[in-house]
């Protein structure tokens, strides 16, 4: 860690405020190296493209030479037919050899053209590979600056400038509190939740707000519990070790979101759920909740 920006318990905005920075020299070197390699690869593409153009010109030149030699040989052979002795056999033979050489020259030029095209494709593939390396190096360089992952704040730093920060979670560099949404959870015995459904109205009281009660709804019942989680091992599970306290967690949503956002994390309180079953007895719970919220004044003394 080279620089720590965030102060403990100071509100931070997601993706805007910086938490800390790590040493970027080695990542900058890799980025510069990749950028330099890409520039060289782009020059290689230009050079290979010029080679293709040169090879195309060589093909045109060799084809022109072949056409000229073929025409000269045709004239010589026609002349020899019309006027025997006007053109020597040696001259005709020389022209025939020149024609073969011209044909070989065309083939050689075409082979050279194919070779330059392969070189151009290889240069483009190399440039694509280096672009990927440059993008990876740019990503690593960007990750040297760590921003707030959500709206919230750092409650404690466990590192100092100059200490090593690694991606393997041996030890956290600090504790970040996510305040983007407050989650209200209460635990109930499983037998009490048989008639509870999402959307059921609730009343809540909080120890930090004595004398007040708030309304909300059931958001969901968290069906999974820690007692139902087991790690796979090479040993058979002992039936005597299997057990549960028989409780499930229920998550709520307050009708007043501002109140929920103002609650300190870890706030305790009480909640009553009003289901469709047992409506005649709900008045007892309502009275009990109002008594309890006033009792929080006594508990605070």
Image: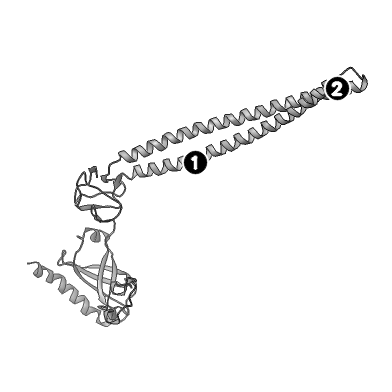
User: Residue 113: x percent and y percent?
Assistant: 64, 33
Mark 2 highlights which residue? Answer: 89
Tell me the SS state at disc 2. Answer: helix
The reply to whether residue 71 is visible in this rendering is: no
Camera-nearest residue between 168 and 259: 168
Local packing at callout 2 (Cα closer than 10 Å; few below 14, some 14-19, many 20+) is some
The quarter in which the C terminus is drawn is bottom left
Q: Which one is earlier in the sequence, the residue at label 2 or at label 1?
A: 2
Tell me the SS state at disc 1. Answer: helix
Camera-nearest residue between 85 and 3: 85
State left or right for residue 277 relative to residue 41.
left
Up-down: is 150 above or below 229?
Answer: above
The reply to whether residue 190 is visible in this rendering is: yes
Q: Nearer the viewer, mark 2 or mark 1?
A: 2
Splitting the image into 4 quarters, where does residue 38 fall? top left
Splitting the image into 4 quarters, where does residue 23 fall? top left
Mark 1 highlights which residue? Answer: 128
User: Residue 82: x percent and y percent?
Assistant: 93, 21
Local packing at callout 1 (Cα closer than 10 Å; few below 14, some 14-19, many 20+) is some
**Mark 2 vs 1: CB contact within 8 A:** no
The residue under the point 45% across, 43% down is: 132
Q: Marks 2 and 1, how far apart in space?
A: 59 Å
Camera-nearest residue between 100 and 28: 100
């Amino acid at each position: 860690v080279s620089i720590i920006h965030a102060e403990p318990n100071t509100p931070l905005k997601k993706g805007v405020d910086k938490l800390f920075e790590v040493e970027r020299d080695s990542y900058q070197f890799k980025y510069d190296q990749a950028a330099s390699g890409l520039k060289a690869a782009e020059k290689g593409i230009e050079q290979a493209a010029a080679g293709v153009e040169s090879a195309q010109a060589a093909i045109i030149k060799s084809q022109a030479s072949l056409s000229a030699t073929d025409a000269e040989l045709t004239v010589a052979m026609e002349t020899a037919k019309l006027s025997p002795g006007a053109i020597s056999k040696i001259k005709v033979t020389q022209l025939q050899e020149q024609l073969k050489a011209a044909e070989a020259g065309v083939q050689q030029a075409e082979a050279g053209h194919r070779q330059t095209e392969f070189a151009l494709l290889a240069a483009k593939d190399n440039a694509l590979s280096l672009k990927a390396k440059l993008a990876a190096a740019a990503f690593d360089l960007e990750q040297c600056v760590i921003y707030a992952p959500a709206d919230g704040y750092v409650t404690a730093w466990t590192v100092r400038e100059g200490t090593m920060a690694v991606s393997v979670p041996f030890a956290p560099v600090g504790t970040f509190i996510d305040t983007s949404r407050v989650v209200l959870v209460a635990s109930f015995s499983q037998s009490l939740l048989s008639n509870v459904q999402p959307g059921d109205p609730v009343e809540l009281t909080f120890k930090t707000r004595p004398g007040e009660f708030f309304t909300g709804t059931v958001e969901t019942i968290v069906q999974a519990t820690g007692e139902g989680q087991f790690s796979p091992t090479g040993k058979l599970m002992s039936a005597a070790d299997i057990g549960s306290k028989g409780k499930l967690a229920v998550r709520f949503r307050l009708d007043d979101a501002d109140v929920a956002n103002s609650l300190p994390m870890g706030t305790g309180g009480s909640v009553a759920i009003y289901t469709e079953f047992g409506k005649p007895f709900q008045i007892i719970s309502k009275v009990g909740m109002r008594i309890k919220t006033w009792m929080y004044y006594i508990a605070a003394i």
